[in-house]
Image: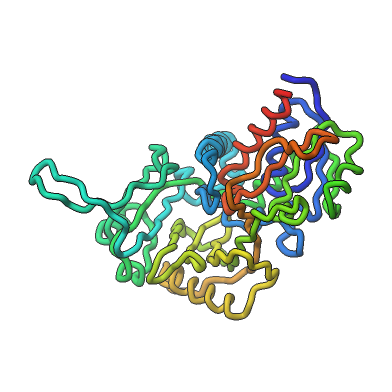
Amino acid sequence: MSACQRVLIVGSGILGLRTATQLLRNGHKVTIRSAAAPLALSGKDAPASPGAGGLWMPFHCDDERVEKWAKHQLEEYLEMIAVQPMLGFNNSSPSPYTQITSLLPSNPPSTSVKSADTGTYVPTTSPPPSWATDPRLNYQTLNMHQLDWQKDVAKIHVPSALLSSYTDCATFEAPIVDSPKILQSHLKFFTNHENGGDIVTDKHYPSIDSILLDSTEHDVIVNCTGYGSASLMSDASMTSGRGCLKYFRRKPHFNTCILIDDPPIGCDERPVYCIPRGDLVAVGGFYLEGDEEPNMRPEEREILEENAQMLLGEFGDGSKWEEVGEWVGLRPVRNGGVKLGVNEDITQTKWIDCYGHGGSGWTVASGCAEEIASIIEES
């Protein structure tokens, strides 16, 4: 291990906090400064992390390193579940995983392959995403008749509107984290650690120079400001991927996670989904690039209410679902991939950027944190 470094982390979302805990475990001294508190759900500078659905799955994060980071995060979640199963995962299920059902377009992209039995060419659907090849995820494609049969075996809820609107789906099993609880756990570790504890969450830095002036007692700066890096770093590759959610009180035995990104019900800009997260069910969605509106629009609220009725309405005894909140967040999307590495343009000190993770912060955080620690310790 390298000598103890004094590190200033700017940003306190999941990337900032997870990087802080990694560096503390590796023997470094860490200070955190951010414009908003880690658990802030609203406000101009609020991080996207606490309101997120918490599903482990790469989403709008186009970077060849994502699979490595995501695998690291998956393994960490499984270790956390083994040690502290009640910390913040889907505890109403006997498995550490939740079954995810992703509906496929009615005419999925296909290619033709020659049948060894008949010698004729038959269509075959596109292969699963590369991250889905991990056998622990149990990724498989089913037709809707198979899904309808499996809903009784796997105890999942499949709304009838979906069975009649799609022909195929993909199912896989992945952890879903209760994002506020995991953030609280990381924050508690940081504040109680002898080399941590120094955190200020109302500190807005308007420029790189303002950070440098405030970091004269530090050896390294790590920039984890998420979408804030668009202005802080003057990064024209950054854009917001605005999302909206409604939260409902989770009913007993509701373990259904459904993702719909394709017509006739969903689309790229208006994905439809429900994610059981801790005591809540998050119903989405929206993915609106370049949209920075901090509040939910009336028409968006109406769409989410319709989504909730479709996805949740048939479950159980038909009693009303209790609505307990709503959220708007800006995913930090970056064209060209995640910005993670030493910024060679800043020469006054070692500056490491870590931003642009799209909707994948909860999927890649620990892998990114480990890479940052390696960069610091290899210098």
On the image, the x and y values in percent for residue 48 come to 66, 56
Residue at screen point 56% across, 47% down: 89
Quadrant in the picture for residue 72: top right
Q: How many marks?
A: 0
Give the image location of residue 158, x and y in percent: 37, 63
Q: Quadrant of the C terminus?
A: top right
Seen from this angle, which residue lies furthest front? 345
Q: Is residue 222 left or right of residue 278?
A: right
Residue at left 55%, top 62%? 282
Residue 178 appears in the figure: no
- In percent of width and height, residue 230 lies at 71, 55
Left or right placement of residue 144 versus residue 135 in this view = left
Q: Quadrant of residue 375?
A: top right
Snapshot colouring:
rainbow
Residue 6 found in image quarter: top right
Name the side, left or right, on which 106 lies relative to 23: left
Where 378 falls versus 32 (above or below)?
A: above
User: Percent from the top left, x then y, of residue 1?
Assistant: 72, 19
Residue at (43%, 72%) from the top-left corner? 310
> Is residue 241 at least partly visible in the picture?
yes
Q: Residue at x 88, y 39 (%)?
A: 215
